[in-house]
Image (spheres, rainbow, N blue to C red):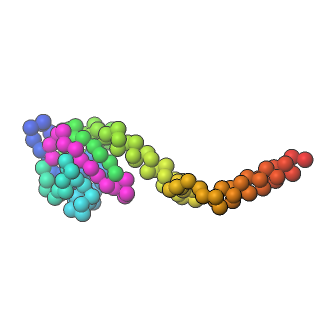
């Protein structure tokens, strides 16, 4: 993999492809053109020149990545080398993990309540709990 000097810059679409955020350059280019990628909180075009130290926000499939550019490269290499091109912020990792667990819960039919249960909900829960206790007592005898 060819890693470029610190003084030079590289197109954002090429860097995203080299860093393995997108499978092809055309997908990276479409994402940038579609407003899914921001550099230093600014919407950019695919030809935007990227430099080390810049903050890149990537919205990929509903998952938000916030990374700091560590190294520039125009060539795609192995995944381990690609991970050296950037450093994901701790806040981004935390938010991504929370989003992943929330999606898993929703797929399982669970959801995080937006408010405390009201009187009716509490009564329904208590009835279910009583039924569960009653059922488990009967199966043990």
Q: Residue furthest front?
A: 119
Q: Quarter of the image holding residue 81?
A: top left
Q: Quadrant of residue 73?
A: top left
In the drawing, does residue 57 fall left or right of residue 48? right
Q: Depth check: give the residue in front, 2 or 103.
A: 103
Q: Position of residue 140 (x, y in %)?
A: 86, 46
Residue 94 lies in quadrant: top left
Instruction: Name the spot of residue 9 as percent of width and height, x first.
Output: 12, 44
Image position, residue 31 (x, y; %): 26, 60
**Along the horizontal axis of the image, is 47 left or right of 136?**
left
* Closest to the observer, 111 or 64: 111
- Kindly identify the residue that appears in the image at 82 percent across and 53 percent down: 135
85 in relation to 12, above or below: above
What residue do we see at 31% from left, 40% from top? Answer: 88
Would you say residue 59 is visible in this rendering?
Answer: yes
Magenta stretch holds residue 59: yes
Q: Please tell me which residue lies in front, 111 or 39.
A: 111
- Residue appearing at x 18%, y 53% in the figure: 42
The span shown in magenta is 50-63
Q: What is the tally of numbered marks visible in this picture?
A: 0
Q: Give the residue furthest to the left.
A: 7
- Residue at 78 percent of width and 55 percent of height: 131
Tell me, yes or no, whether the highlighted magenta stretch contains residue 33. Answer: no
Compared across the picture, whether 134 is left or right of 103 comes to right
Instruction: Return the residue nearer the eye: 126 or 11.
Output: 126
Residue 77, horizontal then vertical, whole percent: 27, 43
Quadrant placement of the N terminus: top left
Q: Is residue 15 visible?
A: no
């Amino acid at each position: 993999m060819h890693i470029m000097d610190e003084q030079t810059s590289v197109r954002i679409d090429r860097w995203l492809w080299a860093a393995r955020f997108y499978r092809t350059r055309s997908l990276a280019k479409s994402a940038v053109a579609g407003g899914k990628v921001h550099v230093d909180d600014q919407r950019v075009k695919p030809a935007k020149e990227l430099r080390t130290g810049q903050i890149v926000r990537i919205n990929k499939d509903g998952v938000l990545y916030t990374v700091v550019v560590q190294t520039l490269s125009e060539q795609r290499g192995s995944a381990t080398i690609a991970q050296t091109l950037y450093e994901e912020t701790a806040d981004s990792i935390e938010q991504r993990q929370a989003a992943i667990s929330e999606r898993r819960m929703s797929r399982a039919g669970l959801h995080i309540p937006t408010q405390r249960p009201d009187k009716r909900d509490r009564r329904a829960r208590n009835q279910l709990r009583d039924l569960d206790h009653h059922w488990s007592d009967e199966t043990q005898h």
